[in-house]
Image (cartoon, rainbow, N blue to C red):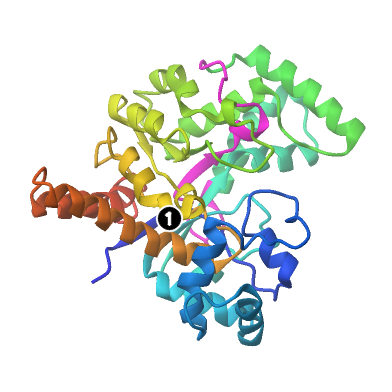
C-alpha cells in the first residue's frame, strides 16, 4: 500500500494543450529556452518525466521527448492530467492560489481531476497589492489590510476557509528583514510612498521591507500556519538572501505567537532549515521541489534534511506548478526516496522497522493534518 501523503504546498495544473515550448517552459525555473539543438528535457527532471511518466500515458519508459509530447497531445491536457494526478495517490492538496491563478486550475478543479480534497493557501502579497490598486488612504492601510486578509482567508462559502498563508518575501526583498513588527508610523509612511508609486506607474509590486514585515505580522495575528518560500526558485530570488537561517530572529520573536512557520523548499539550505526546525518549537520544513529538480540525487538530499529535522517537524510538498507530471513525480519520488533512506537506517541496525514506519507516517501526512488542522 502506498504511503499516505498530503502535499502541503502545490499549485494547479494547466488544462490547455501545450506545444513543445510551452511544456518545456514548465520543466524549469529559468525563463529562458534551452539553446538550439538542446531541450529542457536534457535535465534530471526531464529524464524523470520521460522515464516515469511515459507509462501512464501508454508509452514505454524513457520514450523520447518528441513521442512523449505527441502522445500527451493525443490524449489532451485534461486526460493526461487526470491520469497523472490520480496515479499520484495524494490524500489532499494544499494549493497556493496566489500565482498565475488565471492560468492553472484552482483547488476545486484540482480536486475534481485527482479525486481527492484540495484546500486553499492564501498568498499575502497579492492580497495587499489588489487592495492597494483598488485605492486606499495610507493612514487606513493597516486596518484595511487586516480586514481584507481576514475576508480572503474566510473566502466564499463554496470554497471554505483557507488552511494557511504564504509569503514570497524572499523574492521581493529577501529574508534578511528586521524581525520586529513595524509601528503604526512606519507602516503609514511606507504605505504612502508605495501608494504614490502605484499612482505613477499603474503597477503594484510590493517590495517595501516595512510593508512586507507588516503583512507577515498581520498573518501571524490570524494564528494560521505561514509558509515562507526559502532557497531554490526562479531568477527573481537572490539565493543568498533566501537562506532560511536569516529568519532566526523573526522565529525567536514569533515563538509564542501560536502561528506555525513553514519553511518551503529550503534546498540548498535544507540543513539550515533542519536546524531551525530542531531548535524552534513552531518551525517546520520540507525539501519540496528541490527533490524533483535534483533527480537521481534526491534520496541523498532527503537524507541530509533528515539529519537534524525532528520527524514531527518535516512535511511533504511538491511545489508542482502547471504540469501534472510534477505532482506525480513529486509524490512517487518522495515515497521512493523516503523508503530508501529509512530502510537504509533499518538495514544498518540503527533503527527498528517500527521506527521507520513511525517516521514515514509523521512526515507523509500526520504532521500536515495536525499543523493545518485538516481533520478539525
Q: Residue at x 16, y 51 (%)?
A: 356
Q: Where residue 42 appears, x then y in whole percent? A: 61, 60
- Residue 376 in view of the camera: no
Q: Is residue 148 above or below residue 179?
A: below
Q: Is residue 100 left or right of residue 326?
A: right
Q: Is residue 6 magenta?
A: no
Q: Which residues are magenta?
A: 153-180
Q: Where residue 324 appears, x then y in whole percent? A: 54, 68
Residue hosting label 1 = 296
| 108 or 355, nearer to the observer | 355
Q: Where residue 228 appears, x then y in whole percent? A: 50, 36
- Residue 303 in view of the camera: yes
Q: Is residue 173 magenta?
A: yes
Q: Where residue 286 appears, x then y in whole percent? A: 40, 43
Q: Residue at x 58, y 24 (%)?
A: 213
Q: Name the dominant secondary structure of the magenta segment.
A: loop
| 310 or 100, nearer to the observer | 310
Q: Quadrant of the N terminus?
A: bottom left
Question: Quick one: label 1, few (<14), some, or many (20+) residues within 10 Å?
Answer: some
Q: Residue at x 67, y 32 (%)?
A: 172
**Label 1 residue SS:** helix
| 159 or 307, nearer to the observer | 307
Amino acid at each position: 500500500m502506498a504511503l499516505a501523503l498530503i502535499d502541503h504546498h502545490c499549485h494547479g495544473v494547466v488544462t490547455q494543450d501545450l506545444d513543445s515550448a510551452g511544456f518545456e517552459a514548465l520543466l524549469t525555473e529559468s525563463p529562458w529556452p534551452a539553446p538550439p539543438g538542446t531541450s529542457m528535457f536534457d535535465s534530471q527532471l526531464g529524464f524523470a518525466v520521460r522515464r516515469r511518466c511515459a507509462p501512464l500515458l501508454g508509452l514505454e519508459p524513457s520514450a523520447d521527448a518528441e513521442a512523449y509530447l505527441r502522445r500527451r497531445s493525443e490524449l489532451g491536457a485534461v486526460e493526461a492530467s487526470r491520469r497523472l494526478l490520480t496515479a499520484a495517490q495524494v490524500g489532499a492538496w494544499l494549493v497556493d492560489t496566489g500565482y498565475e491563478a488565471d492560468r492553472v486550475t484552482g483547488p476545486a478543479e484540482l480536486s475534481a481531476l485527482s479525486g481527492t480534497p484540495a484546500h486553499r493557501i492564501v498568498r499575502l502579497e497579492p492580497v495587499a497589492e489588489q487592495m492597494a490598486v483598488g485605492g486606499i488612504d495610507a493612514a487606513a492601510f493597516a486596518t484595511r489590510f487586516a480586514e481584507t486578509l481576514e475576508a480572503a482567508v474566510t473566502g466564499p462559502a463554496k470554497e471554505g476557509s483557507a488552511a494557511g498563508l504564504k509569503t514570497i518575501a524572499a523574492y521581493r526583498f529577501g529574508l534578511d528583514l528586521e524581525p520586529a513588527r513595524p509601528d503604526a508610523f512606519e507602516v503609514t509612511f511606507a504605505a504612502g510612498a508605495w501608494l504614490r508609486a502605484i499612482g505613477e506607474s499603474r503597477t503594484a509590486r510590493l517590495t517595501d521591507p516595512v510593508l512586507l514585515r507588516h503583512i507577515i505580522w498581520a498573518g501571524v495575528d490570524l494564528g494560521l500556519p505561514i509558509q515562507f518560500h526559502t532557497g531554490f526558485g526562479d531568477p527573481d530570488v537572490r539565493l543568498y538572501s533566501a537562506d532560511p537561517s536569516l529568519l532566526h530572529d523573526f522565529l525567536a520573536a514569533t515563538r509564542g505567537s501560536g502561528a506555525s512557520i513553514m519553511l518551503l523548499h529550503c534546498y540548498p539550505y535544507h540543513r539550515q532549515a533542519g536546524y531551525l526546525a530542531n531548535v524552534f518549537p513552531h518551525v517546520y520544513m520540507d525539501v519540496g521541489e528541490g527533490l524533483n529538480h535534483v533527480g537521481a540525487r534526491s534520496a541523498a538530499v532527503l537524507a541530509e534534511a533528515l539529519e537534524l529535522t525532528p520527524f514531527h517537524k518535516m512535511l511533504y510538498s511538491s511545489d508542482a506548478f502547471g504540469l501534472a507530471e510534477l505532482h506525480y513525480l513529486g509524490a512517487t519520488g518522495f515515497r521512493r526516496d523516503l523508503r530508501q533512506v529509512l530502510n537504509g537506517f533499518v538495514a544498518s541496525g540503527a533503527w527498528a522497522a517500527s521506527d521507520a514506519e513511525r517516521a514515514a507516517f509523521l512526515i507523509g501526512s500526520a504532521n500536515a493534518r495536525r499543523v493545518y488542522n485538516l481533520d478539525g
